[in-house]
Image (cartoon, rainbow, N blue to C red):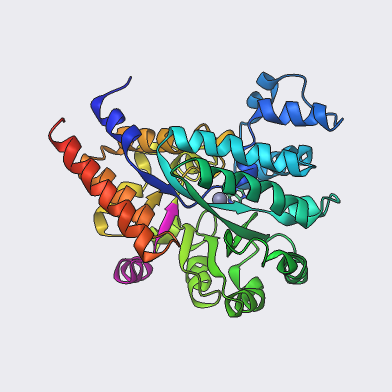
């Protein structure tokens, strides 16, 4: 059921800081690309694909996510994928995205690094020209692969940096967390830092709070992706509040992957009310049941988020972005105006 609060959420300007572009591959596009590229899928219908999205944990999702990504072959495929996400983001009043992409998922299948970059970049640049929308790219290393593989991935991408320096400004770490601690990648993150990249990493999604600690201390990240298990360690929680280290939380993802059993038990609101810089994001929206506004609305309903808290979440998303100080201020001004205008209505 829709409500004035839902309308308020729909109109709220916001940024998305945790979005895997491969995770925005809707089953309809998966089928269209499979047909275009002559690939046989292990499904006969879109309904069958959706029915298969019944995950028990992160690994059960990753197995289908990597299999689905096999339909992405050409520059046009990556462009279509990214443009489809941008349309959904625009509809949700997302002003800015810092999207993740996983080159190793594609290069291992023989897709050139340049193909991946070119397709994603063409869509982001077009959106920047045609809409009030900006985007940037965070290259993620797959943590189930080796440190050597991560170094090779960075080396293969670096020759493209000049061509895409307006977009590619970050390095991240994703895939199977447990058993692949952040410190496995300390040296490659140090190299990325020296090259001037902004650093983020998934930590504390399924992995223990010690992984959050080592992602901060060893990898020197500037934002924690997920981080929901931080709550188990009061000392870590106090440090996150003190440093205002941002957490990119993904409520529907956590529900789908059974990090929480019920959204009403999610710690997003508790952490927000305790003063942690949390943000709301969609992670892999095609797999987890919704884009930004669906995540905001489901969280607001389950956790009784009020207007001020929703504005704070949007504010956190802009402040935690890697955009310039000037750009951030312009978004914050727009957000403040929206909040004031809405106050007189609701
Ligand atoms: N890759 C795509 N989605 C992910 C998630 N939620 N956690 C880790 N790796 C991912
Ligand atoms: Zn993620």
For residue 76, which quarter of the picture? top right
Residue drawn at the location 32% of the way across and 55% of the way down: 330
Q: Residue 339 appears at what percent x and percent y? A: 21, 42
Report the span colored magenta: 234-248
- Quadrant of the rendering where the C terminus is positioned: top left
Total residue callouts: 0
- Whether residue 278 appears in this view of the structure is no
Q: Residue 183 appears at what percent x and percent y? A: 61, 73
Vertical placement of residue 97 versus 320, above or below = above
In the image, taking residue 258 as reference, residue 318 lies left or right, namely: left
Residue drawn at the location 65% of the way across and 47% of the way down: 122
For residue 284, which quarter of the picture? top right
Q: Residue furthest left?
A: 344
Q: Residue 272 appears at what percent x and percent y? A: 29, 53
Residue 66 highlighted magenta (yes or no): no
Q: Nearer the viewer, residue 335 or 55?
A: 335
In the image, taking residue 148 as reference, residue 239 lies left or right, namely: left
Residue 244 highlighted magenta (yes or no): yes
Q: Residue 329 appears at what percent x and percent y? A: 31, 59
In the image, taking residue 23 as reference, residue 317 lies left or right, namely: left
Residue drawn at the location 35% of the way across and 63% of the way down: 326
- Whether residue 113 appears in this view of the structure is yes
Vertical placement of residue 134 versus 243, above or below = above
Residue drawn at the location 57% of the way across and 76% of the way down: 193
In the image, taking residue 26 as reference, residue 250 lies left or right, namely: left
Question: What secondary structure characterizes most of the magenta part?
Answer: helix
- Quadrant of the rendering where the N terminus is positioned: top left
């Amino acid at each position: 059921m829709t409500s004035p609060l839902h309308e308020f959420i729909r109109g709220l300007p916001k940024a998305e800081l945790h979005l895997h572009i491969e995770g925005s591959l809707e089953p309809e596009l998966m089928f269209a690309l499979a047909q275009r590229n002559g690939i046989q899928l292990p499904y006969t219908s879109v309904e069958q694909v959706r029915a298969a999205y019944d995950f028990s944990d992160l690994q059960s999702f990753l197995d289908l996510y990597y299999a689905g990504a096999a339909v992405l072959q050409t520059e046009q495929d990556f462009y279509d994928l990214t443009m489809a996400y941008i349309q959904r983001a625009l509809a949700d009043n997302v002003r800015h995205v810092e999207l993740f992409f996983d080159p190793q998922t594609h290069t291992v299948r023989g897709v050139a690094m340049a193909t991946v970059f070119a397709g994603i970049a063409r869509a982001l640049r077009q959106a920047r020209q045609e809409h009030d929308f900006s985007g940037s790219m965070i290259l993620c290393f797959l943590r189930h692969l080796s440190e050597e593989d991560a170094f090779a991935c960075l080396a293969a991408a670096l020759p493209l940096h000049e061509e895409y320096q307006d977009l590619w400004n970050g390095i991240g770490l994703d895939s199977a967390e447990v058993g692949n601690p952040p410190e496995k990648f300390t040296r490659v993150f140090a190299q990325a830092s020296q090259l001037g990249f902004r650093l983020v990493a998934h930590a504390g999604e399924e992995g223990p709070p010690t992984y959050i600690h080592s992602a901060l201390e060893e990898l020197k990240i500037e934002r924690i992706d997920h981080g929901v298990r931080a709550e188990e360690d009061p000392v870590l929680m106090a440090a996150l509040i003190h440093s205002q280290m941002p957490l990119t939380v993904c409520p529907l993802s956590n529900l789908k992957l059974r990090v929480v059993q019920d959204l009403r038990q999610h710690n997003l609101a508790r952490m927000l009310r305790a003063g942690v810089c949390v943000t709301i994001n969609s992670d892999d929206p095609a797999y987890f049941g919704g884009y930004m506004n669906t995540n905001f609305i489901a969280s607001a309903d389950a956790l009784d988020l009020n207007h001020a808290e929703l504005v704070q979440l949007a504010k956190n998303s802009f402040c935690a972005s890697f955009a310039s100080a000037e750009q951030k201020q312009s978004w914050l001004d727009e957000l403040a105006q929206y909040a004031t205008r809405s106050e007189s209505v609701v």
